[in-house]
Amino acid sequence: MAQATRTADEAAEKGGRPSALFIADHPALDFLNSHATPAGRPIEWLADGADLLDWQVAAGMVTPEVAKKFRAHPALDAIAAEARSLRAWLGDFVRRHAGAPLPAKAAAELQPLNRLLAKDESYARVAADAAGQLHLERPRRWEDPEALLQPLAAAVADLACHADFRLIRRCAGHDCSLMFLDRTKAHARRWCSMAMCGNRAKAAAHRARQRPD
Ligand SMILES: [Zn+2]
């Protein structure tokens, strides 16, 4: 039993790495946070193809069955490299535009995204949902591992089209690089999470108050 627990812990911390973080309240920003510096230590969660599959399953972007299909594919590491390039481009785009409404002219900067979206092989079909209501859905054929880039591209497209860029922020934690979309009612979110940065900041403020002058 102890052995099984240790194995699970090791799986969660591949190479001393914590589990991937999904704190951004938007999948494209979670994708951006797949390379981040929480608590001052840079962590790469998309180091290779296996990482990409694990992250996409954890993010709910691909099913475990799709991940299994591509896990031994020789092109998988190259696809992960393309994902990291897309993420680097997204990071530049978000840093340039976060804090202000995204202007229509920003569409001109989206060619790398549009080139990727143009390769999408999803198709439309009508199906019944759980409530018995018919709806149009867009499944993918998943014939080539390149298709793994499409849910990432779709998330980035959703960010560009639907997110309020005024509410995209970086965590206020010292040395924390995590980004999020502040969907709170008061738009007063400051931290990636209370557990990681909020409590540390509160403790530091408390110590500062206790310090004699
Ligand atoms: Zn933080």
Image (cartoon, grey):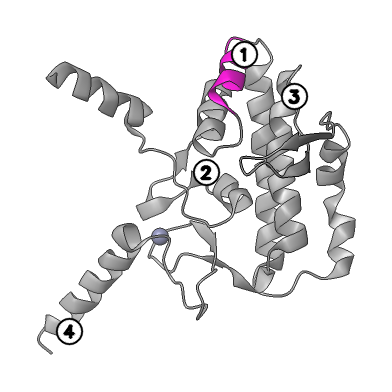
* Disc 4 from disc 1: Cα separation: 56 Å
- The yes-or-no answer for disc 3 within 8 Å of ligand 1 is no
Amino acid tagged 3:
Glu
Q: Earlier in the sequence, mark 2 or mark 3?
A: 2
Question: What range is drawn magenta here?
Answer: 63-72
Residue at x 26% of width, y 28% of height: 9
* Disc 4 from disc 3: Cα separation: 54 Å
Disc assigned to residue 146: 3
Ligand 1 image position (quadrant) = bottom left
Would you say 114 lies left or right of 17 here? Answer: right
**In the orientation shown, which residue stands out farthest toward the front?**
132
- Location of residue 186 with respect to 26 vertically, above or below: below
Amino acid tagged 2:
His
Amino acid tagged 1:
Lys
Residue beneath label 4, please?
A: 209
Image marks 4 and 1: residues in contact by CB distance under 8 Å = no
